[in-house]
Image (cartoon, rainbow, N blue to C red):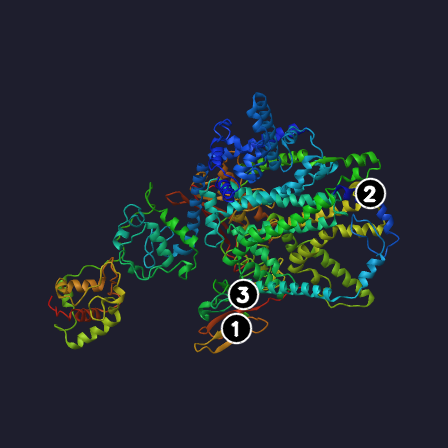
Amino acid sequence: MGLFNRQVKKKTENGNGKANGNAPNGQDTNGHDVPPSPETGEGGAELFDVKTSETMGDRVGGTLRDKSPHAIKALMPWIDKARSGPEGRAEFIDKTKEVAWVQADNTVRAISAGMGIADTRAFFRGDPPIEKPNPRYKVHVNAFFAHLRPKYYEKASTKFSHTFALGYLSIYMFLLETITGVILMVFYTPSDRRAYEDIIKIMSSIPYGQLMRDLHRVGAELMVLIVVLHMTRVFLTGSFKPPRSFTWLTGVVLLILTFALSFSGYLLPWDQLAYWAVTIGTSMAKSVPPKEIVGYFSNLIMRGGDTINQNGLLRFYLMHVFALPAITLVLISVHYYRVARSHGISLPAAEEEDPDPAVRKAAKERIDYLPELFTRELLWAAITTFLVVVYSAYVFHAPLQEHSNPLHTPLHTTAPWYFLWIQGLLKDAFVLPAIRALDQLIISSVKYIGVVMPPGSTIIVPLYDSPAWMGVILPTMIIPALFFGVPYINEWWEKFWGSKPSRQLLKNRKGTVVVAILSTIFMLVIWYQGTPFYGVTAPPAVEIGQAFLPEEGVLPPVPLVPDDWGPIRRLGYENLPDGEYDLAEYAVPKTTYTEFERILSAIQQEIMRRGQLWEEGDKEHGLPEPTGVFTIEQWQQNGLKRIELQINWTKTTPSDTGEFKRVIYLQQDTRYQ
Amino acid sequence: MAEAQATAASAAPAKAAAVKPAAAKPAAGHGDAVNIGPSAAELAMVQAPMTRREFLNYAFLGSLGIFLVVFGGAFFVFALPRFGAGEFGGVFDLGLAGDAIPGTEDAPKASTAARSWVSNTDQGVVALYNVCVHLGCLYGWEPITNRFECPCHGSKYEKDGTYIAGPAPRSLDRFVIRFTDANGTVLAETNAQGDPLEIPSPNALMIVDTGKIIQGKAHG
Amino acid sequence: MSVQFKILIGILFTVATIVVLVLYGINEDNRMSQYQKNFAGRTIQAGAEYYETYCATCHGEKGEGIVGKGPPLNRTDLLDLKKTPYLKQIGWQGTTPDFIRNTIAAGRPQFSSYYAEENYQQHMPTWSEDFGGPLRPDQVNALTAFIMNWAPGENPPLIALVTPTVGPTPTPIPPEEILKAIPFPMPPSDQIIAEGKDLYTKNCQACHGENRDGKGPGGLGSIKPPRDFTDCTGMAQVSLVLHHDVVVNGLPATGMPAWGKKLSTEEVWKVIMYEREPCKLYTP
C-alpha cells in the first residue's frame, strides 16, 4: 500500500490533477464490498470509470491505470457498464469470471511450468494433452528438474526386462545416501575421541537414529550392488558399443567413485572393523609404484600420519561428505547428460536389429516421460523406499564393533565384501602357482636352445609376485583399463575380424559370452580367496576359540547380512549356567541336550576333529590329544559372567605352551542377535 | 535427441560401408555424419601459420595449467603430515640391555612407544617394526607355533623376522639398534644390512632408532 | 499393467512405508532404552577385559586387593552411591564414578592415608593417555563402569566387605615407653636441634614451611592445613607422645604421611625437637 500511496502523491506533486487523497484509500478499504456509488463521488469503483477516463486521468493520472494488475485493468471497461443496469451487471460478472479464469490459469501455468488448468487435469486424468503444441513438452523447457529429463523415450528402451531400472535405482541410492548422510551429520563429530561415542549416541539416544544409520548402510551396500549389476547389464546387452563408448567410460569412473564413497564411509564409525579395514585399504596404496614416491606419499596423505589417527579420520570424513560426493555428482551429470541428450537408452538388440522394419519402427515408438514414465519412476521409488525401510527397520542392523584400538588387530580382519576380490588377489593362491609353473616351463625349455639358468632363478614371477601387482596394479590399473577399454577393445576386435557390429548376445556375440563366464568365475574364485575361510590360518586352538568366541563380530563376505558374534554370545547371559564343564563329557551328541549343551557338544566335536587331523598327519590344522574345558563364572553380582574356553594339548616343541585360553565377559543386558 | 539417435542407427550400416575405403583415417565421432578427409578450407586453416593472438592464447592456457600444478603442489605440502620430536620416527631409549632384551629362549618383547618387537636369537638382537610388511596390520607373537603371525592375511615370520609363509613380499622390517655406555659412547650399531646385533654388555643402554628402517629381504 | 494399477500399487507401498515409519517410531523409546542398556553392558564387558589386563595384578582379579600391591576396590564404603564415607572423609566434591575415573586417569601423586595405603607400597600410576599412560578415554570410562558395577545396588557385594582398618596396624605402645625411648638427654642440646633442622629441611619443610609456620607450598590446599609450630597455644595441646604418634603414623585424610618407615627413631625425635623448639615445649 505504501508504494501505491507514494505513487499517487508523486502524481499530485507533479500537478497532474486535483487528486483526491481519499481515492486510493477508498478503493483499498472498500474494495469490492462497496457497490459503486457515483452519488458520493468518492466510491472506489468510480476510479475505474473508463468512460470518463479524462476525469480519472485528472484524479490519479494514467500511471495508476498502467500499473494496476493486469486483471483489474482488464475489468475496468466493465465496471461502468455494471453501473448502468442489471444487464450490465450480469455482463460484468461474466467478465469477472473470465478474468478470474485467466488469472487462475496463468497461476497454474506458472506452478506447473507450462500446463494450464485443463491440461493439468488432463495430465492427472491420463487424457491426451488439450493444447497444441503439447504443453507437457513446455514443462521440459521451463522446469529445471524436468529439463534434465528427456521429453520422451523410445518404447522398447523402457522395457523392464531390458534395463531392470538399474540406472534409475543407482541415482535413487545416491539420493538416499545423500539425504540420510546429511541427517547423520547432525550428530556426528569427526574426532577420534568423539566419533564412536557419537555413533553410540545416534543409535541409543536419537529417535530414528538407528534407522537412519541402517538406511545409510543398506543404501551404501545396495548402491555398490546396483551399480555393479547396472554395469553387468550394459555389458551383456552390448549397450557400451558406439555411440555409447564415452558413456561407458564415465560409468567405469562412477563405479570406482562408488567404491571410494562406500570405503571412505567405512572409517567413520571408528570401531575396530573400521580402523583395520581402512588400515589394510590404505596400505594397498603404499605399494603403488614407484613406491618410494607415489606409494609412500599417497598413503601418507590419505592417513595424515604413519598410522590412521585423528588426521586420517578427518581426511576420510571430508572425502566422504564433500570431495567424493561433489566429484560423483559432476560425473553423474556427465553420464546422464549423454544418456538423456546424446544417445538415449539403448534399444533391446533383438528389436533394433530385427530385419522386419515394422518391428524396428514399433520399438522406436515414442513414449512421453510426462506422465507415463514419471508415474513409473514414482512407483519404483515407492517400492524401493518401502523395501529399504523395512529391511533396515526389522532385518539388518549396521554392525558396530568395539572402539578402535590402534594397538591390536583383531583376528581375521577383512575388507568389505566388495573389496574381498582385491584381498583375494593379495592372498593369491592360484594365479601365482600357475605363473611359477609357467616360469619353470620356460626355464626348462630354454635349456634346449642352450641357455642354462642358474638353479632357483625366476623370469616372470618377480614381475607378478608382489603386493604392488596383486593389490594395486592389477585392481587399479589393469582391471580398470580392461573395463575402461571394453568399448574400444570391442570396436577393434570387430574391425579385426571384419564382423558386423551387433549387440545380440547369444546370436552374434558368443565370444562375449565366454569372456563374461570366464571373468565371473575368476571374480568368484578370487572373491572366495579373499574371505577368511581361505588361507588365513591361525594356530588350530586359536581357530576353535575364534569359531565359538570370536574377538569381534564376524562380518559375512556377502552384502546385507548382519555380523555374527558367535553362538555363545548369541545364546545370551540368561542361558549360560555357571560351572566348569569338561568338554569330553559332551563328545557324544544327545537329543536331550539343551541349546547350551549342544554348543558344548559342537565345541567338543571341533576339538576332536582337530585331534583326528593331527593323527592323520595334518600338523598345520591338527592338535595332538586335545582336551577342552569350558568355564562360566559369575564375576560380578550385578549381572556379569566370565566365560573361558581353555584348550590343552600335548606340547610338541619347547616353546609350545600346550594351552590356549579365550576369555570373554558377558553382561546381562547385552544382546548379540 | 531421438533424431540424432535415429541418424546414428540408420547410419550404422552406411558408415561401415563408407569407412572401409578410407582405412587410413579413423572413423569420425559416433553419430556424426561421415566425411572423408578434410576440406580445402579445413586444410588451409590447419596449415595456417601461428598468429600472435593464437600464441598468446596458448600461453594464457599454459600459465593457467602451471598455476594449477603449483596450487596442487601447495596443497600437497599443506596436507603432508609432519612428524614432531619424541613421536614415532625418533629415537627411543629402551633402558639397560639386560632388562630390555629377552633371553634367546624367551618370547620377544613388545615396545608400544617404539612400535617394535625386541627379539633375541642366538645370532643376536633385532628390533622389528611391529607392522606387517604385507598390508599394515599389527602381527603378534604366537607362542604356540613359536613365530610371528599376522591376524589379517596370515603371513608368518620367524622369531628374527624372516619370512616363512603367507602373502607378505619380504621379511619383516627392522629398526637400527644402538648400544651405548653411560657416557653415550656407541658400543655397537646395526649394520646397513640390518643383521642381528650381539649384546656388548648387559649394562649397555639399548636405543632403537625408528627413523632408520631397514627393509626385510625379499623372498624369491 | 495399466497405469491405474501402477498408481494403486504406488499408493499402497507409500502408505505401507508411512505405517512402518510410524510403528517404528512408536517403539523408539523402548528400543533406545534397550540399546542404552545393551551398550552399558558392552561397556562393562570391555571394562572387565581391561581390568583383567591392567588392574587385576595389583587390585586382585575380583577387586579384593592384594596386600603389598593395591587396596581393595570392591567395597561398600567406596562404591555405595548414597553413603560414601571414604569420599566424604577425603573431601571429594564430585560423584563416585568421577572420583574413580579421576583416580584411574591421573593416578595418585601421593599415598592416601585413609586406607593405610602406605601398606601397599606402590603409587597408583597414571593410566590415561592424557597423563602419559596407555589408556584412551573410552577405556578409562569402561574401567569406571566395570568398577562401579560392584556397587551393591540390589545385590550384596561378591566378597566379604572389609573394614577400613585392614592392613598391619602397629601395636599401641604405652606413653612412658615412648618417652623412655628418647635417645638423648632432655632438653635437647643445640647439636640435636641443628641435626633436627637438617632433617626438617629435607622432609618437612615443603609443607610445614621454612619458618615452621605451616605455610609451606606443599601444604597449600590441604583439607586440614599443616601444623603451625610457632603457634604456642596450639602447640600446647600437642603432647610429646601425640607429636611422636603423628610423625610416625601420619594423619589419615590429611596430607601428613607416616614417617615411621622412612626415619629412624632417633631421627624422628630429632625432628620433633626442632619442631618444638620455637615454643620450647620439651616437657612431656
Tell me, yes or no, if residue A586 can be seen here. Answer: no
State which quadrant residue C107 falls in: bottom left
Q: Is residue A363 above or below residue A232?
A: above
- Disc 2 residue type? Ser
Q: Chain of mark 3?
A: B
Location of residue A229 in the rendering, given as x and y in whole percent from the top left corner: 67, 43
- Disc 3 residue type? Leu
Q: Secondary structure at mark 3?
A: strand
Side of A369 where A493 appears, left or right: right
Eye-nearest disc, 1 or 3: 3
Please tell me how crowded label 2 is: few (under 14), some (14-19), or many (20+) other residues with Cα within 10 Å.
Answer: few
Choose the circle earlier in sequence order: 1 or 3.
3
- Give the numbered dot on residue B198: 1
Location of residue C193 in the rendering, given as x and y in whole percent from the top left corner: 18, 74
Q: Which residue is mark 2?
A: B10
Q: Are marks 2 and 3 on the same chain?
A: yes
- Disc 1 residue type? Glu
Choose the circle earlier in sequence order: 1 or 2.
2
Tell me how far mark 1 sits from mark 3, CA to CA.
Answer: 15 Å
Q: Which residue is mark 3?
A: B128
Q: Secondary structure at mark 2?
A: helix
Q: Nearer the viewer, residue C109 or A11?
A: A11
Q: Residue furthest top?
A: A86
